[in-house]
Image (cartoon, coloured by chain):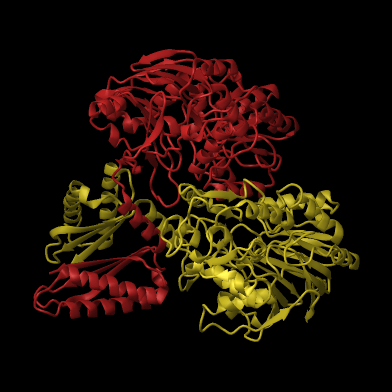
Chain colours: A red, B yellow
């Protein structure tokens, strides 16, 4: 009996979504069969409020410790940072001979980023293209081109001993995309016809009704702006939105505008995408910012970063009149061609208002369809399920509420409820040909935070301290104690930051010094001096005193020096 | 000539919007004529990211210093905190006999809040109702009921020596509001017929096309949920959204549900609104949470705070299983009946996801029209301008981009561009019967921040320190120096918080101690010891060292104690 159970576990496939901060399996997914592990993507997330100072959150790979030799390979769906950004941190978790498979653009982005990490393990990347098949036993993988908002985005058709899996990657359907072929519905149908045991599909757009906008619609609206604008056009978007950037370049060439590229990541990405053939631009189109005055305003497009209101991005620097060369003019037209990432609403409003104050025209995606998300919406998601006709379904890539909505959609499309599993990061889903289920035990998924050079060293305690420091600052009380008498010598020093404006708080500080002396002298009066106790007394009593005077709770650090 | 100019200045009216954080004149507006000042509203704003620890931002009233006797009165448009919340802080800027005029509900809210500030100047509030006329010379004011999402919201029809002004307050048009009469279009038209020299109109909805939803539509959708829900209904909204709360109560009574009210501010507000007659509820409807088990789930509605994902609100406590009495069940239906305030998107997503994880149904305003904003949208704003037909126009209450959009709308509606002034907080707009203009000099509007008991004592330096502390923490180095030799005695103490996890950083700390000793001993070697210089050396060199090891920049505080 035991053997049989073990055998049946061995014969089932494990699906383990990893990667943090709300979205499930967005950054990394593991497929495991017969102790062999396939890694899909190695991405990162940007943290939000509540995690001050943290640069990124990367997937927790504890599960992979000691299993280097079980990893058969890493497949990359596309070149966005939430799918590739953790490679420099995690590549050491795999054997140095482990192969990475990625499209040409993704490979370019990965290698360029890797240059920022000298001394890290060298990458072994194989370039793949649409239709390529690779075998990483027991997984046979075919790369299937999918439309998103970056070229070289691949769904994965994976043949496994328990059946075929289709992993969509981030995707949308687009009959009129930019710079790449339309969605190959025939291919998706043929995948469905081969029989698919499990579909794992992008849920990011599952709460949005209808269909996503085609890039063609966006193009028409952008062209409308290009036709009407009499001055310069400043097009602000993500530097990773290669297809949107191409649109701006194509329109600039059509309307005889020179293109100035501003922002470090924008310059880098366009340069690389151009070199690899993913962006098409005439040599003469691009000019340097300092040449801008040689052309009339009506012949200039500026493509820049900063559509999220980022402090140091080109757009903000121009808006704040801090840019080396560029200033806004009243006849400029600024186009915000990106959605607003949750959490950035206020910064975007600020930069938009600052631009408007200079009399400049502003178009943003709420006013006109000049941005489309890269994700399939309800009707597209249904169509995907109908074409693939899987036995089992796992919604991936999205906040929990989106997964739930996607699961409902799948049920409405005819997949029995028992065949749908809504998994969270760290959940282990097992399936064989007839059954899918969630294993009770989870894989470790505590956030791994990257802060400067430290990976995983900032934990809950450090973060909690940062939040306390942020709210009410710090208050250090330093008392020198005479070892012989146990009494405070002189007046305690106080150093405080972020609490009150010290120059205007002399009375408060004087009273605090007086109280500190009294607390210590009283507590150290006995025979046995317990410094930990005395420090605690100072902390609690001075904390209470300061709160009574200010209703603020700075972090109190008592320092006692015996001499 | 000079006399004539002075006379003409005296004969012009000044309009001064005050109040912070993006929205213009939302919190406070001054009208001044012949040195007499009328104050409209005294509200506060909640700060966002970047202002850690700050409770509120209140209007800068420097302009009112020394002018107590010039203030003729304070009129309050409605009882939302962004219109009344600064009263306890600012009431001391006016003479203690200065009268406040407010609707009954606003008066109730103001007085209840004032109880939280014992020892503050007593308030002198006159209750007014629709159609009431008061004279605060040179201003004659009529209160005109306007629909918003709280009862007792009044537009102000103000007769002044330069002509009539209409100040809309926050408003929307609603033909089918809850618990109050529909918009009185006849009244607005009659105001227009009397002749209006200046319209100041709410711009919050100026970027939204069409018309705002009627509360009747919301009611129908909410009723749909009440009809279909088999379990408890948990209705989460703002405690200040009195009309929405009334809807939930009305529907509960219609469907024989008892109502449990949860959340401190929700209990308080409902109690007060009920006592004042602004909420209608049968005595038997309301039950305490502990009685909830005496009724079947299908006969229970819970009305609670927390729709913005606030940490300590009832909804979050229930979702996190921290509520004293209540837990979510799978057949519960949770209704988020509020929009998401910019900046709260992530917290709302988190609480929504946590509720969904418990198998509970969730409805939010993106899925169904179960919330309407309280602000007129483009078509309503146009209609307001058409009815009032003012000579001059100032868009108020909104982010700059909304003011610009509203100004465009006014121009499209026939007001000449030169008659429209887009003002910012602190701008002084002057007008007489024939001309409106922006005065060059501004009134002081630096943010006044409230942090605990401190009003205005937290400035840029304290905030900057808090942000530095939040990002990388603090690092205190304490060295005891022998006064005679100038050399460090023993090993320096290090206290650090929010920087690295100290237990795992012993090597870093040991190296830092060693370096500190070397820096001090070297710098203090000469004849004249310059402690400021030595502290700077420690700060810079230890800062540089820590950055090289961690790429973090904690705030370095060197402490040197001579013994």
Q: Nearer the viewer, residue A16 or A433?
A: A433
Q: Nearer the viewer, residue B539 or A554?
A: A554
Q: In the visual, does A148 lie left or right of B2?
A: left
Residue A230: image x %, image y %?
Answer: 74, 34
Residue A536: image x %, image y %?
Answer: 23, 70
Judged from this view, the residue extending furthest toward the front is A1
Visible residue check, residue A173: yes
Visible residue check, residue B109: no
Residue B451 in the image: above or below residue A321:
below
Residue B307 in the image: above or below residue B190:
above
Judged from this view, the residue extending furthest toward the bottom is B97
Residue A238 in the image: above or below residue B120:
above
Q: Nearer the viewer, residue A196 or B347?
A: A196
Which quadrant would the C terminus of chain B be assigned to in this image?
bottom left
Which quadrant would the N terminus of chain B be assigned to in this image?
bottom right
Residue A235: image x %, image y %?
Answer: 62, 34
Q: Quadrant of residue B214?
A: bottom right
Q: Quadrant of residue B549?
A: top left
Q: Residue at x 34, y 31 (%)?
A: A88
Q: In the visual, does B356 lie left or right of B490?
A: right
Q: Residue at x 28, y 76 (%)?
A: A513
Residue A521: image x %, image y %?
Answer: 18, 79
Q: Residue at x 47, y 32 (%)?
A: A419
Judged from this view, the residue extending furthest toward the right is B193
Q: How many marks are shown on the rendered structure?
A: 0
């Amino acid at each position: 009996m035991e053997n049989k159970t073990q055998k049946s576990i061995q014969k089932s496939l494990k699906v383990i979504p990893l990667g943090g901060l709300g979205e499930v399996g967005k950054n990394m997914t593991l497929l495991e069969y017969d102790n062999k592990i396939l890694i899909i993507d190695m991405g990162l997330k940007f943290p939000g409020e509540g995690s001050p100072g943290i640069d990124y959150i990367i997937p927790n790979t504890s599960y992979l410790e000691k299993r280097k030799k079980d990893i058969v390979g890493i497949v990359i769906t596309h070149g966005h940072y939430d799918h590739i950004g953790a490679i420099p941190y995690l590549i050491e978790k795999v054997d140095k001979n482990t192969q990475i498979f990625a499209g040409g653009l993704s490979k370019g982005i990965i290698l360029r980023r890797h240059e920022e990490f000298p001394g890290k393990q060298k990458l072994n990347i194989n370039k793949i293209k649409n239709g390529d098949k690779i075998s990483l036993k027991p997984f046979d993988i075919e790369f299937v081109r999918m439309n998103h908002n970056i070229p070289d985005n691949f769904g994965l058709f994976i043949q496994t001993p328990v059946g075929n899996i289709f992993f969509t990657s981030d995707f949308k359907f687009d009959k009129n995309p930019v710079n790449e072929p339309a969605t190959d519905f025939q291919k998706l149908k043929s995948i469905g016809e081969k029989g698919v045991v499990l579909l794992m599909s992008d849920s990011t757009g599952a709460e949005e009704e209808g269909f996503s906008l085609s890039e063609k619609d966006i193009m028409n609206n952008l062209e409308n702006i290009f036709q009407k604008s009499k001055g310069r056009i400043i097009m602000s978007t993500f530097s990773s939105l290669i297809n949107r950037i191409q649109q701006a370049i194509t329109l600039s060439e059509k309307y005889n505008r020179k293109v100035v590229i501003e922002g470090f990541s924008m310059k880098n990405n366009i340069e690389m995408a151009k070199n690899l053939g993913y962006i098409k631009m005439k040599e003469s189109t691009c000019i340097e910012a300092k040449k801008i005055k040689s052309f009339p305003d009506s012949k200039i497009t500026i493509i820049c970063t900063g559509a999220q209101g980022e402090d140091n991005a080109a757009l903000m620097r121009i808006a704040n009149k801090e840019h080396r060369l560029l200033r806004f003019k009243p006849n400029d037209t600024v186009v915000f061609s990106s959605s607003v990432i949750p959490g950035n609403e206020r910064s975007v409003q600020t930069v938009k208002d600052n631009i408007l104050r200079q009399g400049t025209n502003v178009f943003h995606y709420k006013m006109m369809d000049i941005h489309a998300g890269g994700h399939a919406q309800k009707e597209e998601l249904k169509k995907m399920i109908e074409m693939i006709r899987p036995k089992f379904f796992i919604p991936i890539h999205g906040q929990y509420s989106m997964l739930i909505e996607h699961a409902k959609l799948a049920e409405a499309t005819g997949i029995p409820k028992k065949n749908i599993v809504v998994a969270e990061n760290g959940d282990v889903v097992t399936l064989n040909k007839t059954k899918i289920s969630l294993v009770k035990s989870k894989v470790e998924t505590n956030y791994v935070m990257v802060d400067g050079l430290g990976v995983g060293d900032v934990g809950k305690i450090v973060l909690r301290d940062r939040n306390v420091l942020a709210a009410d600052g710090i208050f250090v009380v330093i008392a020198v104690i005479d070892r012989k008498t146990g009494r405070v010598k002189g007046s305690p020093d106080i150093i405080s930051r972020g609490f009150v404006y010290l120059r205007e708080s002399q009375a408060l500080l004087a009273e605090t010094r007086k109280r500190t002396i009294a607390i210590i002298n009283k507590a150290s009066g006995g025979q046995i001096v317990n410094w930990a106790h005395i420090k605690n007394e100072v902390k609690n009593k001075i904390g209470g005193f300061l709160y009574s005077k200010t209703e603020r709770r700075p972090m109190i650090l008592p320092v006692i020096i015996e001499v």
